[in-house]
Image: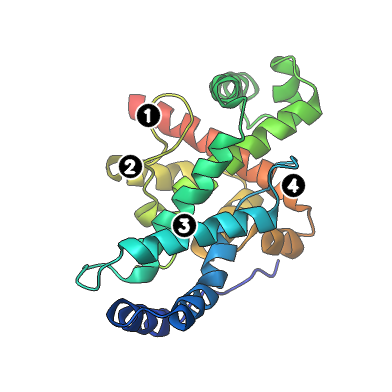
């Protein structure tokens, strides 16, 4: 199966020079140029989310929210900072989008409870069946309609897509297990990834199916959007979001089990 073999490439040097020039001599022209140069970064962050089906949130809405975060980052950035502007702005853009998604998520507490229930159900069925359970099997065990369970998986992916993806625009070429650091993961109890269990993460990834490992590599290592992955694998964006959501639950469950060994 042919995959997308590429890395996101932003002209960070030009952007950094523009920011330095702007901080020295702020003009509306330079500000517009900085926003223009940063649009690919904003779109890539937004592209990692399966947009909720609500009139309060569309792709363009999130891009505009991200642009607001970019401008906030520009106001707060000083040229004596040790980090490059694109890295500094990344977290502010991401934070703005996350805050907006939280503000329109009226069922976040209920969803967090369901996340935990789904994780526990997957774990129990995996022990009973001796394999990773299928979606309809988990849905039946949870007494959920399959459509509702698939929506839950998409919610998982939406919730953690940005908080797990802390490697974009990093200078590091490390693999997924080396570079994912999660500080805002919203599933119950401890976050999915931290520095102490990166080796366990690598082991947990090996338990995934070949297709799931391909999707994980495309999503994190190749930094592809949901649309790009969907086109590569001839699946819908919604299905890719669901698969990633299930992988996150499975990985967290596997990591918890490894921690007890």
Q: Nearer the viewer, residue 183 or 5?
A: 183
Quick check: can you spot residue 257? yes
Question: In 3D space, how far apart are the residues under numbered discs 1 and 2 (Cα atoms)?
Answer: 9 Å
Element carrying mark 1 = loop
Q: Residue at x 67, y 46 (%)?
A: 241
Residue 238 circle label: 4
Q: Nearer the viewer, residue 87 or 258?
A: 87
CB under 8 Å between discs 1 and 4:
no
CB under 8 Å between discs 1 and 2:
yes
Sequence-wise, the earlier of marks 1 and 4 is: 1
- Residue 167 screen position, x and y as percent: 41, 59
Residue ID for mark 2:
194
Q: Quadrant of residue 120?
A: top right
Number of numbered discs on residues: 4
Q: Is residue 149 above or below residue 231?
A: above
Sequence-wise, the earlier of marks 4 and 2 is: 2
Q: Residue at x 37, y 56 (%)?
A: 179
Sequence-wise, the earlier of marks 3 and 4 is: 3
- Residue 64 screen position, x and y as percent: 59, 59
Q: Is residue 117 above or below residue 9?
A: above
Question: In 3D space, how far apart are the residues under numbered discs 3 and 4 (Cα atoms)?
Answer: 26 Å
Question: In 3D space, how far apart are the residues under numbered discs 4 and 2 (Cα atoms)?
Answer: 28 Å
Residue ID for mark 1:
190
Question: In 3D space, how far apart are the residues under numbered discs 1 and 3 (Cα atoms)?
Answer: 28 Å
Q: In what quadrant of the picture does the C terminus appear?
A: top left
Judged by depth in the image, the label closer to the viewer, 2 or 3, is 3
């Amino acid at each position: 199966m042919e995959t997308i073999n590429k890395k996101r490439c932003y002209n960070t040097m030009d952007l950094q020079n523009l920011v330095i020039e702007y901080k020295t001599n702020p003009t509306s022209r330079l500000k517009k140029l900085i926003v223009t140069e940063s649009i690919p970064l904003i779109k890539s962050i937004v592209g990692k989310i399966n947009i909720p089906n609500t009139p309060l949130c569309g792709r363009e809405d999130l891009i505009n929210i991200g642009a607001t975060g970019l401008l906030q980052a520009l106001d707060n950035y000083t040229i004596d900072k040790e980090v490059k502007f694109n890295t500094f702005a990344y977290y502010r853009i991401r934070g703005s989008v996350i805050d907006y998604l939280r503000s329109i998520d009226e069922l976040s507490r209920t969803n967090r409870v369901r996340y935990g229930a789904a994780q526990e159900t997957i774990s129990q069925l995996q022990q009973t069946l001796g394999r990773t359970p299928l979606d309809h099997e988990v849905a039946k065990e949870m007494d959920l309609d399959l459509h509702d369970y698939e929506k839950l998986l998409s919610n998982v992916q939406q919730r953690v897509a940005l908080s797990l993806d802390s490697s974009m625009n990093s200078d590091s070429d490390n693999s997924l297990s080396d570079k994912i650091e999660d500080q805002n993961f919203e599933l119950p109890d401890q976050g999915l990834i931290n520095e102490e269990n990166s080796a366990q993460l690598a082991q947990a990834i090996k338990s995934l199916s070949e297709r799931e490992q391909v999707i994980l590599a495309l999503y994190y290592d190749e930094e592809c959007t949901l649309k790009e992955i969907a086109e590569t694998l001839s699946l819908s964006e919604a299905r890719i979001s669901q698969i990633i959501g299930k992988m996150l639950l499975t990985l967290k469950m596997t990591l918890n089990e490894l921690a007890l060994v």
